[in-house]
Amino acid sequence: MKDRAARIAGAAAAACFALALAGFGAALDGYGHADWPVAVLGAAGVPRAAGFNLLGYLVPGLLAGFVALHGRAALPRGSGLAARLGWSLALLAALAFAAQGLLPLDASAPDAGRGRLHGVAWSLWGLAFVAASALLAVAAARGRRLPAALGHLCAGGLVFALGWLPADAMPAPLAQRLAFAAWLAWVACVPRGRPAR
């Protein structure tokens, strides 16, 4: 029953983010997904910013946190450090994602004040998830669950590559959206199977 609740929470997190991004983006005059980062929709001074921060960051982040807590709680007694730390870092990533909604950018000065804290939360989200996915991949490999290990590695590798890709390789707004999509796909379909020891 709890596993089903975690699957529903993961799918709901991905759906909530996608619908918020599409809906609030369509409602903001002049906003183009290819031209503007996601955070602009929740920036101070932007119409309906509070709604986007709630539905685009806070709710999906908390749902992802529930998934991570479930993954940590489902580990058998005596599980290895890699699995325990991996799920703890996955929870940190989820909370950092949610924190982006509590620390909105200032549209007039994105690199000042709370805007800098938004950037810190974004970086913490990415780095914590990359580390979590690597540790969970190690734990899955030790448990001889190679498909799960590959799933963790692919998600983490995509978030890292897209989050820190040079701007001339891909437009930053597109890379950011793809990084969020890779993480949310992982949240919705966390590689399952016998928990690693």
Image (cartoon, grey):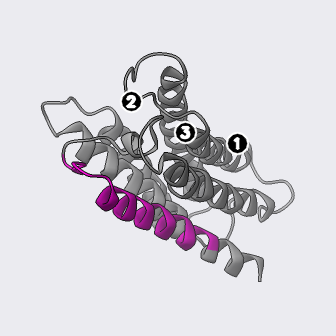
Please state which of residues 37 and 81 is positioned toward the viewer in this rendering. 37
Q: Residue furthest left?
A: 168
Q: Residue furthest right?
A: 77
SS label for mark 2: loop
Q: Earlier in the sequence, mark 3 or mark 1?
A: 1
In the displayed structure image, the side of residue 112 where residue 78 appears, left or right: right
Circle 1 residue: 85
Please state which of residues 128 and 195 is positioned toward the viewer in this rendering. 128
Question: Residue at image x 21%, y 48%?
Answer: 30
In the displayed structure image, the side of residue 54 where residue 1 appears, left or right: right
In the displayed structure image, the side of residue 23 where residue 26 appears, left or right: left
Circle 2 residue: 107
Circle 3 residue: 100
Please state which of residues 50 and 155 is positioned toward the viewer in this rendering. 50
Q: Earlier in the sequence, mark 1 or mark 2?
A: 1
| Amino acid at the residue labelled 3 | Gln
The region drawn magenta spans 9-34
| Amino acid at the residue labelled 2 | Ala
